[in-house]
Amino acid sequence: MNCNKKTSLFRGCGKFLLFSLIGWMFLQCETKELEFMQPYQFVNDDFDGIVDLPAVADPDPVIEEPVAGEILESEEVQNIEEELGAAESEADVEASTVTILEKIAEFVLEQPEETSDEVIELADVLTEEQIAAIFDAETELDPEFIVLAEEANEDLDIGELFPDIILPPLDEENVDGRKDYSMPFDKNLIIENLRTATLVGPCADAARDSYDAAISRLVTIRDGQLATAQATFQTRFLAAQQRFEARNLQAILDYQNRLQASIVFVNRLLVVSTRLARFNVSWARWYRWYAWIYMIRTRDTIDRLYRFALQASQVAYDRDIANAEQQRDSVRTTIQANFANAVANADSILSAALNTCHNQGAGN
């Protein structure tokens, strides 16, 4: 009996020791496995889902050509010049044309005596050299003569004999104070609370490292897009300058050509006056008075058209630059908004990762 009891006891003890050994080995294996199962390895991959910033469209703004003025010449001027130039006697001149010559004389003689005398004196001795001098770009017209020519242009009887000018309104925009929507982004301010109030340990450190790498990648993309937007603006700025300079150069050429063409035409009027003097001295004088007023009026309209062309060119340039700046700022705003959204997404991932680290044990 005693022997059998000892045998049963031995067998019971052996089973206990065997199960204890198996349990101890299992715990050792599980511990070893957990030592290699580092929690931060599971949060690193979360940041791989932060995609690059999207490309931002940057279409060219619409380029509007400046409005143009125009000098209008009446056909009546050309018709009378041709009729009087071809006339060989008074019989060759239409009664309506004679009436116009008489109205020109009335207009001059009805001016204040000092003005009337001066116009007659200058007109009677008008020469080709004086005409060339009047149409010299450096010559400044007497303001009183400009007013006289304007009155002649508005006169109901003879106004159709002078050039008129059309200057459309300029749409001058206030382009000052346009807002620059681009601003530096300080990610340190956004994540400071996450850095100072979270866990420590390899899991938390790994999460922050992955976050920093993602933000650094986003910053690089953002800065590249902003640089491209600025480079595109610079290209548009230079193109606007080139258009501005080309327009101004063309305005100068047009101005000079009009001055030269006017010299030729006023000289033709003098030739007609000389031909009229063969059979009617009074008509010749009156037509010479007309030629002088026409010369002043033409020079004034050419000057005004030239100044308008330069002003319109400046307005167009300012508009081009303002549109380019506005487009650049709009693109900057979109880039910054995309960047802010991406950072907010990264913040959420970091917060979730740190919570995971906390749940796995103090960030270890």
Image (tube, rainbow, N blue to C red):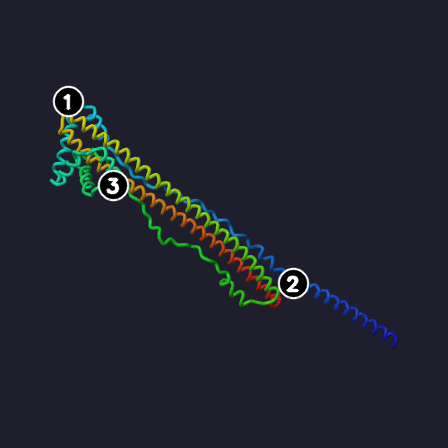
Task: Classify residue 345 as left or right of residue 135.
Answer: right
Residue 100 falls in image quadrant: top left
- The residue drawn where x is 63% and y is 63% is 39
The quarter of the picture where the N terminus appears is bottom right
Q: Earlier in the sequence, mark 1 or mark 2?
A: 2
Q: Is residue 353 above or below residue 252?
A: below
- The residue drawn where x is 38% and y is 42% is 243
- x%, y% of residue 341? 49, 56
Question: What's under tag 1, amino acid-wise?
Answer: Ala
- x%, y% of residue 216? 54, 57
Residue 45 falls in image quadrant: bottom right
The quarter of the picture where the C terminus appears is bottom right
CB contact under 8 Å: marks 2 and 3 = no
Question: What's under tag 2, amino acid-wise?
Answer: Gln
Question: What's under tag 3, amino acid-wise?
Answer: Thr
Closest to the camera, between mark 1 and mark 2, is 1
Q: Nearer the viewer, residue 232 or 112?
A: 112
Q: Nearer the viewer, residue 107 or 264?
A: 264
Q: Earlier in the sequence, mark 2 or mark 3?
A: 2
Could you give the CA–CA distance between mark 2 and mark 3, rounded to whole angstroms?
91 Å
Q: Earlier in the sequence, mark 3 or mark 1?
A: 1
Sort mark 2 into few (<14), some (14-19) or many (20+) by Cα contacts within 10 Å: few
Task: Classify residue 40 as left or right of residue 298.
Answer: right
How many numbered discs? Answer: 3
- x%, y% of residue 201? 61, 67
Sort mark 1 into few (<14), some (14-19) or many (20+) by Cα contacts within 10 Å: few
According to the picture, the residue beneath numbered tag 1 turns out to be 91
According to the picture, the residue beneath numbered tag 3 turns out to be 139
According to the picture, the residue beneath numbered tag 2 turns out to be 38
